[in-house]
């Protein structure tokens, strides 16, 4: 079954969730939801409130989260063509330098841009960085809604992947812009090749502020006026004075947006050093692109055709309920970044950037180690079994010698002093025998349990620790002063899985069936553990009582 991931785009006005998978040449949407962000305009808690708006309404599961805004930095570096390890060191040094300058922890990832004919002998590296504080805010929200982080990615890179997979890609040079409320994500592609990706400040908020200032209304009222009355279409006949006032009010904001797009082209030329860059067309999306007449206005200013980008014309939505499909159709311009994020996670050929917080990187590095830990445990068990067998054989020989010496002591009082030495030695060897028997029992017990866990451990469970000890536990049928080998196994469970308790009960049922005589106890709450022993005395005691 194809991998399914939720792309999440948290904005100051809306929060978009789009779950699905890329299969063959088609993306299949499995679920979609959009929520209004209740945060006040300009407030610092818009991320937390955006996530809170979706609690109990959408369970994202594995998720890729888009990043944009002032706490995200995308830059370009030209470097000689060097081995991967050396390139990683160069980027690590640059990220460290940025973090030192800003005085904050920075997470990052990088990728090479496609080779360009204008640049010979060098590579252009796209380096994306984000403040750890921004990632932590999103992680807190994702945890509240019950999701699991796959990674963070710049929204601009998600926009590029949406264009590459669902746009009409030719050999021309295209600027694709996602016009959000407070941010503008811009991509420039030449044919299928990415030339430039960046996030800028400015978006639909420019129009709202202009209307609010001109007409003396609140920001929320200004947005409603913008959608109902304002127009940039040339030759518009105004239906009322308010229509004219709103339309004239947004002309200055439209000019600012036009300047931002033109500056992005100039910045691409200077950063990537493609001085002969010339646009052939512009595609716009995002909530701000719905403004009436905006494509015509931008086309007159940039002297190239401008159209709205609708990737959902080639996306499969057949599995969506009608009401959700209608909701997606209504908000398709706002959902392009969420679609690109989901595509990046499920399309193996996607151009990718995966930004992870340092704590997540460490945790994943640890979790990727159990296979090696299990292999090491098996080797250790085999060694203990071999050692225990050897020691058991030696102990048997020693016991026979001790018995012979004890008989000689009884027959010859004259050798009393020598017999005392052998008696002391015999006591020491007896302790060794008990220890060796315990080692053998633990080794055999661990080997048999590992073999069963290898066959029956659910795929969403993993083992983190196995400890063997000689002790007592009345629940396992081992009384005090009659210590026996006990095996303790601990593990974790994948977050968000269904029927964890049922899977755990099935595991213990299997262990009891495959290990006759085993006594065990366990619990799957917040991870799982099993304490067990093959040397409990419940059955023996019951048999004696029956007699």
Image (cartoon, rainbow, N blue to C red):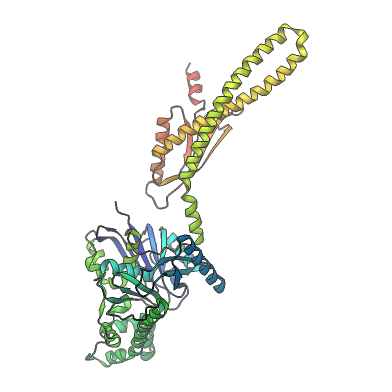
Q: Nearer the viewer, residue 377 or 178?
A: 377
Position above or below: 139 against 371: below
Measuring from the top left, give residue 276's x and y in whole percent: 34, 81
Which is nearer the eye, 468 or 210?
468
Residue projecting furthest to the front: 121
Instruction: Report whether residue 491 is seen.
Output: no
Nearest to the observer: residue 483 or residue 297: 297
Residue drawn at (38%, 60%) of the image: 63
Q: Residue at x 32, y 89 (%)?
A: 251
Q: Quadrant of residue 439?
A: top right
- Quarter residue 202 falls in: bottom left
- In the displayed structure, would residue 266 be above or below residue 398? below
Taking 398 as reference, is 130 left or right? left
Q: Is residue 290 above or below residue 34?
A: below
Q: Residue at horizontal 61%, vertical 25%?
A: 434
**x, y percentage for residue 504?**
41, 41
Residue 57 versus residue 402 in the image, above or below: below
């Amino acid at each position: 079954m194809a991998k399914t991931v939720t792309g999440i785009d948290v904005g100051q006005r809306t929060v978009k969730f789009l779950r699905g998978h890329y299969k063959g040449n088609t993306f299949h949407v499995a679920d979609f939801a959009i929520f209004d962000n209740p945060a006040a305009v300009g407030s610092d808690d818009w991320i937390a409130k955006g996530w809170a708006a979706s609690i109990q309404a959408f369970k994202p599961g594995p998720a890729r989260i888009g990043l944009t805004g002032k706490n995200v930095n995308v830059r370009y570096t030209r470097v000689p063509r060097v081995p991967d390890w050396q390139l990683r060191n160069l980027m690590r040094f640059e990220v460290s330098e940025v973090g030192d300058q800003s005085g904050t922890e920075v997470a990052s990832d990088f990728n090479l841009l496609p080779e360009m004919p204008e640049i010979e002998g060098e590579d252009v590296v796209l380096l994306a960085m984000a403040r750890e504080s921004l990632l932590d805010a999103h992680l807190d929200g994702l945890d509240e809604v019950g999701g699991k982080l796959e990674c963070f990615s710049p929204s601009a890179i998600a926009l590029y992947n949406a264009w590459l997979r669902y746009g009409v890609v030719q050999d021309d040079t295209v600027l694709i812009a996602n016009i959000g409320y407070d941010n503008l994500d811009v991509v420039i592609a030449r044919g299928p090749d990415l030339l430039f990706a960046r996030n800028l400040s400015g978006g639909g908020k420019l129009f709202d502020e202009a209307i609010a200032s001109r007409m003396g209304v609140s920001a929320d009222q200004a947005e409603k006026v913008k959608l109902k009355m304002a127009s940039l279409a040339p030759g518009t006949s105004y239906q009322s004075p308010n229509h004219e006032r709103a339309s004239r009010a947004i002309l200055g904001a439209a000019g600012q947006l036009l300047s931002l797009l033109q500056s992005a082209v100039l910045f691409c030329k200077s950063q990537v050093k493609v001085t002969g860059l010339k646009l052939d067309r512009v595609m716009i999306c995002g909530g701000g692109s719905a403004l009436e007449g905006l494509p015509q206005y931008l086309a007159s200013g940039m002297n190239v055709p401008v159209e709205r980008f609708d990737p959902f014309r080639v996306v499969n939505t057949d599995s969506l309920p009608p009401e959700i499909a209608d909701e997606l159709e209504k908000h398709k311009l706002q959902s392009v970044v969420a679609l690109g994020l989901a595509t990046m996670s499920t399309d193996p050929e996607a151009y990718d950037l995966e930004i992870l917080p340092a704590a997540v990187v460490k945790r994943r590095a640890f979790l990727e180690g159990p296979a090696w830990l299990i292999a090491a445990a098996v080797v250790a068990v085999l060694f203990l079994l071999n050692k225990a067998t050897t020691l058991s054989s030696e102990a048997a020989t020693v016991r026979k010698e001790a018995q012979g010496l004890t008989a000689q002591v009884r027959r010859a009082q004259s050798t009393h002093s020598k017999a005392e030495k052998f008696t002391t030695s015999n006591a020491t060897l007896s302790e060794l025998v008990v220890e060796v028997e315990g080692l053998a029992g633990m080794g055999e017990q661990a080997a048999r349990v590992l073999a069963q866990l290898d066959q029956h451990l659910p795929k969403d469970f993993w083992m983190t620790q196995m400890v063997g000890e000689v002790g007592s536990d009345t629940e396992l049928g081992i009384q005090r002063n009659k210590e026996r080998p006990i095996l303790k196994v601990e593990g974790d469970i994948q977050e968000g899985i269904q029927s964890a308790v049922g899977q755990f009960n099935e595991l213990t049922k299997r262990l009891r069936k495959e290990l006759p005589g085993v006594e065990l106890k366990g619990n799957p709450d917040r991870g799982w553990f099993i304490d067990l022993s093959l040397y409990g005395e419940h059955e023996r005691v019951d048999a004696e009582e029956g007699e």
